[in-house]
Image (cartoon, grey):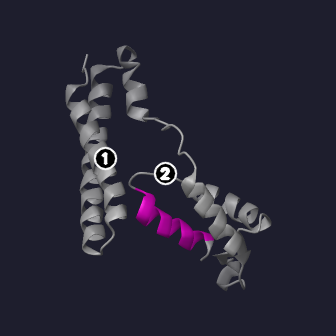
């Protein structure tokens, strides 16, 4: 797959609970190739560069799966702004909450649909990870209801 194809596949499978950027994907692919974890294929149209995982890459992935995942990195831009709520006007806070509610409602609905699809396709592990995203958005919506407005 090319970097763009990898990004699209990762976004579909991981996007509801793991954020990544296109620049991260494109930055890491040459590093993975240098390490022997992926190999370059024949360049395609518009100089697109496909990559394929190597046996060494599969072994590295298996080792990574066995490692401790470490601690969660919690970064919520709405909570950060709420922490400075005294510096906001009431309208600013209400706008912040409205946009956050809309985002979490839409993201939760999408994650629910993806989880349902994963279950239907016989992917209980993918569905379980997506249920995490559903629970996260549900918790965020609950928190937003109780967040102070002044």
Q: Position of residue 150 (x, y in %)?
A: 26, 16
Q: In terms of secondary structure, what is the magenta stretch mainly? A: helix
Picture residue at 43% right of the left edge, 57% below the top = 15
Where 1 falls versus 89 (above or below)? Answer: below
Which label was assigned to residue 19? 2
Label 1 Cα crowd, 10 Å radius (few <14 / some 14-19 / many 20+): few
Q: Is residue 10 left or right of residue 135?
A: right
Where 30 falls versus 85 (above or below)? Answer: below
The region drawn magenta spans 3-15
Q: Position of residue 26 (x, y in %)?
A: 66, 62
Which label was assigned to residue 46? none
Q: Is residue 147 left or right of residue 7?
A: left
Q: Quadrant of the N terminus?
A: bottom right
Q: Position of residue 78 (x, y in %)?
A: 38, 32
Q: Is residue 10 left or right of residue 34?
A: left
Q: Quadrant of residue 14?
A: bottom left
Residue 4 within the segment the image draws in magenta = yes
> In the depicted view, which residue is nearer to us: 44 or 11?
11
C-alpha distance separating marks 1 and 2: 15 Å
Q: Nearer the viewer, mark 1 or mark 2?
A: 2
Picture residue at 53% right of the left edge, 45% below the top = 69
Q: Position of residue 49 (x, y in %)?
A: 69, 77
Picture residue at 75% right of the left edge, 61% below the top = 31
Picture residue at 54% right of the left edge, 40% below the top = 70
Res 63 visible: yes
In the picture of the structure, the residue carrying the numbered disc 1 is: 103
Give whichever of discs 1 and 2 has the lower sequence position. Answer: 2
How many numbered badges does the structure rendering display? 2
Q: Quadrant of residue 81?
A: top left
């Amino acid at each position: 797959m090319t970097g763009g194809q990898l990004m699209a596949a990762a976004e579909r499978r991981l996007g509801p609970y793991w954020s990544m950027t296109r620049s991260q994907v494109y930055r890491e692919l040459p590093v993975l190739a240098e390490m022997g974890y992926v190999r370059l294929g024949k360049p395609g149209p518009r100089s697109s560069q496909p990559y394929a995982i190597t046996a060494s890459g599969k072994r590295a992935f298996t080792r990574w799966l066995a490692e401790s995942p470490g601690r969660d990195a919690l970064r919520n831009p709405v909570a950060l702004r709420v922490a400075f709520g005294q510096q906001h006007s009431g309208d600013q806070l209400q706008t912040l909450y409205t946009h956050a509610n809309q985002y979490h409602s839409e993201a939760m609905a999408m994650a629910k649909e993806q989880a349902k699809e994963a279950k239907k396709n016989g992917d209980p592990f993918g569905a379980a990870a997506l249920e995490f995203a559903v629970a996260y958005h549900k918790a965020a919506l609950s928190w937003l209801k109780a967040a102070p407005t002044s």
